Amino acid sequence: MKTTITTDVTMHPFSFAPRGPLSAHLMAILIQESGSTEAGDVVGCAERALAEASDVIRDDDVQLALFLLYASHYGSLDVIDAGWEWHPMLIATRGVLERTFEAALRERVPVPAAPLPTRDEVARALFALTAPTPGPSVARFIAKKATVEQARELLMHRSVYTLREADPHSWAIPRLTGLAKAALVEIQSDEYGAGDVSRMHSRIFAQTVRGLGLDDAYGAYVDVVPAVTLASLNMMSLFGLNRRLRGAIVGHLAAFEMTSSLPSRMYADGFRRLGYGPDVTWYFDEHVEADAVHEQIAGRDLAGGLAVDSPDLLPDIMFGAAACLAVDDWVGDEMLSAWEAGHSSLRDAETATR
């Protein structure tokens, strides 16, 4: 017999709390065995949450709800029964949230004009878009000024994506063909350790997390990161899980790789400055070299190859790259503003350091 949903999740098995009526409703559903309960009017609940959100990108309830719905596809949270993954009402709910989230990104992210659809022109445009800029950045702050507590906060923010590193982009593999597919597989093979599980980037990052005395269980710090940090991962999932947005996920990965090598060097230097050894800095040192190679493959063969094969996807390739930069900047700006003001960048510093 199917049970009635209650949004009282005070004893729920998640490692984080709901952030509003929608995420509470979803968590109450997802802790049940699939088929044992009805989903209720979760679509209506999502529509109400969107109507009440002044900024969907920074809305705690909306972004946690998207995170939960995407977690069902990744299998990243063991508490969610796999049978919920394709439940029609949850897919409909995801669609309602995604449409508004995507519209907000397209409205706010400035996108440069698309280049000619050749490998060299696409790579040139992406390298110009991602060229290093002077001024404050999280990487420079970590390198020069961060305290140990601020370095720990950085890892808490990063843990939401990096403990599942590469997974959002891997959704694109079966959706590409030819050179673009081969390029993506080459990049992802390195991300997953090229057959050596100990060298998987997510595993190496988990070692860094442990090295600072933090919990490497996936989701351990979801409770304390702000909505915009969840939005950064949710954007990748949005692009990766929707075939029509395969251009955007390719552009995102290209920009991601092109903006990784130099910051990784700064992060490694910052952790060394704070007294940490190779067990902690390995993750960042690995990305200095690996991403210097990946950025060339991502620009010319992945993004450029896709543009040659499917010129109609070129605007989305540029949108995905620009969105990667913009959202990362939004996350970084919130962190830096908090640190420069002398307080934590987390929602609840006491919970984060327990």
Image (cartoon, rainbow, N blue to C red):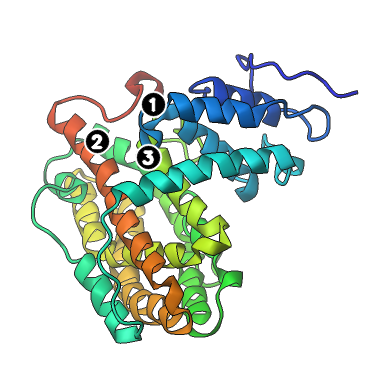
- From the top left corner, tell me how far across and down residue 93 is, in percent: 61, 38
Identify the residue at image location x=8%, y=51%.
135
User: In the image, what residue occupies the spot 8% across and 56% down?
Assistant: 134
N-term-proximal mark, 1 vs 2: 2
Image quarter of the C terminus: top left
Q: Residue 198: x and y, percent?
A: 51, 61
Residue drawn at the location 30% of the way across and 47% of the way down: 108
In the image, residue 194 sits, relative to residue 219, either above or below, namely below
Q: For residue 35, what is the image quadrant?
A: top right
Q: What is the secondary structure assignment of the residue under circle 1?
A: helix
Q: CA distance from mark 1 to mark 2?
A: 17 Å
| Rendering coords of residue 185 (x, y %) | 52, 75
Residue 77 in view of the camera: no
Against 12, residue 66 (above or below) is below
| Gap between marks 2 and 3 measured at Cα | 9 Å
Q: Nearer the viewer, mark 1 or mark 2?
A: 2
Residue highlighted by disc 2: 334
Ranked by sequence position, the earlier of labels 2 and 3 is 3
> What is the secondary structure assignment of the residue under circle 2?
helix
Which residue lies under the disc numbered 1? 352
Q: Is residue 214 above or below residue 267?
A: above
Residue type of the residue flagged with mark 3: Thr
- From this viewpoint, which residue is outermost toward the left? 134
Taking depth in this image into account, of 147 and 139 the one nearest to the observer is 139
Three-letter amino acid code at disc 2? Glu
What's the distance in space between the residues labelled 3 and 1, CA to CA? 15 Å
Residue in front for this viewpoint, 56 or 353: 56
Instruction: Decide: few, some or many residues near mark 1? Use Cα within 10 Å; few <14, some 14-19, many ≥20.
Output: some
Quarter of the rendering containing residue 120: bottom left
Taking the spot 31% from the left edge, 35% from the top edge, the residue there is: 153
